[in-house]
Amino acid sequence: MHFLDQAKIYLKSGGGGPGAVSFRREKYVEYGGPDGGNGGKGGDIVFEAVRGLNTLIDFRYSQHFKAQRGTHGMGKDRTGAGADDLVIQIPVGTQILSEDKEEVLADFTEVGQRIVFLEGGIGGRGNASYKTSTNRAPRQHQPGIPGQEMWVWLRLKLLADVGMLGLPNAGKSTFINQVSNAKAKVGHYAFTTLVPKLGVVRHRAREFVVADIPGLIEGAADGAGIGDRFLGHIERCRVLIHLVDISGDDPAEAMRTVNAELAAYGSGLADKPQLIALNKIDLADDELAEGFAAELREAGAERVFSISGATGAGMEALLDAVLTYLPDRTSTETKAAEVEDTEAADQIVWSPI
């Protein structure tokens, strides 16, 4: 399945049905009169965040969403039927932006979150509603309120507890494959990762979600490389793991380059707590690793973890540090507990006692 994190779509709620112009005509009934009913309400455009979706790929092939119009009123004071709402299912973490992308209109951060985005038009009045003591045979009616319409952008920001970043080929894919159930592509060339990846890490009876994004290079904020488009996927993370390649030309400069791009991007990414991980220590001796770690500390890193994504060396200490930034129970663990409680309840045998 392809990954798509932005999509532009057109929305239109249903218009209200027109009111009816009708007069009562029955055999053996001496008095008639107006009996045209009101029109039905148009369908709403509703967005709902659901579990199991992690991409906006469905909106590449379907960009127009129009709710049905309300049914017209009828004689015998019959009100037209209201149209069903059009429910659009989206992944958790999706934002709805205005057409110019300047305003966030809605933000979905929880499973089951549901909002009425565009309301359907109200049905028009039938001629029976215009009857008065001085207007016994009204022929006016209302056509119904038109529905609302607009173009919007959908932007997906993955929900993860921990975000990973670094230069291309820093070993991020190898790292996430080592600590989680992810199957990220690994290669000996830059930009092996082209789209964000998610992995669930289980450590010391805890679970949390890690997001891996494509590597950043100098000038990413200005569009160099893949650019900084995917940085939005780690905006909601509680802590960042910054991988630095020990086999690079200058690890300290690599760390400064990535941090400069975070500052240029904004949105508070530069202020998020970072755990600096000096990766690929299996390719160097202990003395060289300690020397590079000292350089990173001099460059501003508060604490440096020497690790190897390939062998798993040093992972325990790094993951222990990650847990200190997470709440007592992460969103992933809460969902898992809810599932377990539901399954346990289903297994209880009913008894009248």
Image (cartoon, rainbow, N blue to C red):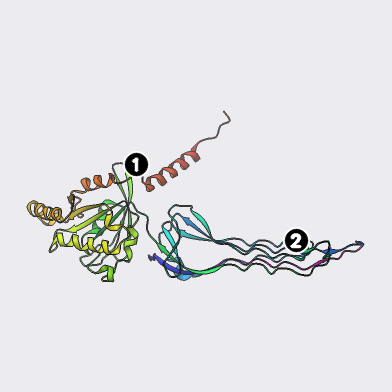
Foreground residue among 247 and 20: 20
Q: Residue at x 42, y 66 (%)?
A: 57
Residue 17 vs 338, above or below: the answer is below
- Which quadrant would the N terminus be assigned to in this image? bottom left
Which residue appears farthest toward the front when viewing the image?
134
What amino acid type should be assigned to the residue bearing mark 2?
Arg
Residue 240, visible in the rendered structure: yes
From the image, give the main secondary structure of the stretch colored magenta: loop
- Left or right side of 81 for 275: left
Magenta residues, start to end: 12-27
What amino acid type should be assigned to the residue bearing mark 1?
Asp
Report which residue position mark 1 lands on.
328
Q: How many marks?
A: 2
Q: Position of residue 349 (x, y in %)?
A: 52, 35
Q: Confirm whether the magenta stretch covers residue 22.
A: yes
Which residue appears farthest toward the left when viewing the image?
287
Badge 2 element: loop
The quadrant where residue 251 appears: bottom left
Report which residue position mark 2 lands on.
78
